[in-house]
Amino acid sequence: MTSPAVKFEPEKAKSLTEQVIELSGQNLLACYQCKRCAAGCPVAEETGNFTPNKLIRMIILGEGEKALNNELVWRCVSCYTCGTRCPNNIHTARITETLKKMAKKGHAKVLRPRVANFHKSFIDSAVRWGRLNEGEFVGCYELKNTFSFLKKLDFVALFKEHLTQAKLGIKMLKKKRLHFGFQSSKGRSEIKKLLKKAERKAGL
């Protein structure tokens, strides 16, 4: 049985590609599908073998909905292995971050709410104080997760979440890898201005 032909809409594809290139700063058109990024992607098995090269190809073909709704966008750990291996220096991590922003702007369904909560908590904490304070960051992150589980009345998942995090916290404390100190930095107003400028550019 042959696979269905790809439906290619030139204008739609051009618009999506140009938008992602502008927002991510990555030249997607330089990708010639050598798959070196795919060979080194550490989360490929977690995404159903949906690799960086496939994501780039999908964007170039104008398949915006599929590009926004796939596991790689939400499971990418931004290790930059793909960009390091790419002969044309294309960093897919910056593309996935761009697609997250586009998904937020378009109110698309988030495939991994915990990832979105982590991302939002990290940015809010870092921008608020100019530095990341682990105690506040983790507290905000877990609070968002709690509200998500309560909204779905999933008390079993809520219990497992807090039990898992408690066990992890104890292990980190024993290894002295969890810090409760509070720090802030100068120039926080400039950081906030830069974030707002970036959000305006992304249309958020």
Image (spheres, rainbow, N blue to C red):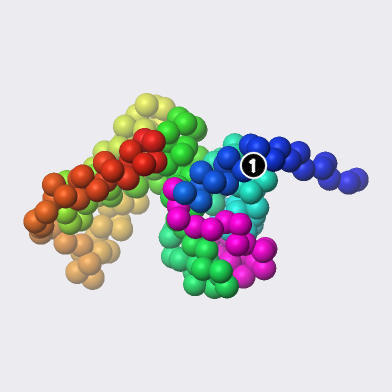
Residue 11 visible (yes or no): yes
**In the rendered image of this protein, does residue 90 appear above or below residue 19?**
below
The residue shown at (43%, 60%) is 78
Name the residue located 61 percent from the left edge and 57 percent from the top edge.
29
Q: Is residue 154 left or right of residue 196?
A: right
Q: Is residue 86 above or below residue 73?
A: below
Q: Amino acid at mark 1?
A: Ala
Residue 17 % position (x, y): 57, 46
Residue 174 position within the rendered picture, expressed as x and y whole percent measured from the top left = 21, 68
Q: Can I make out residue 113 in this image?
A: no
Q: Residue furthest right?
A: 1
Residue pointed to by mark 1: 13
In-front residue for pair 91/170: 91
Residue under the image location 46 percent in, 66 percent down: 80
Does the magenta segment cover residue 64? no
The residues colored magenta run 23-45
Q: Is residue 67 left or right of residue 32?
A: left
* Rendered location of residue 135, percent (x, y): 18, 52
Q: Nearer the viewer, residue 93 or 181?
A: 93
Location of the N terminus by quadrant is top right
In the picture, residue 9 is in which quadrant? top right
Residue depicted at x 41% and y 27%: 152
Say which element carries label 1. Answer: helix
From the viewer's perspective, is 77 left or right of 144? right
Q: Nearer the viewer, residue 196 or 161?
A: 196
Taking the magenta stretch, the answer to whether it contains residue 37 is yes
Image x and y of residue 194, in percent: 24, 48
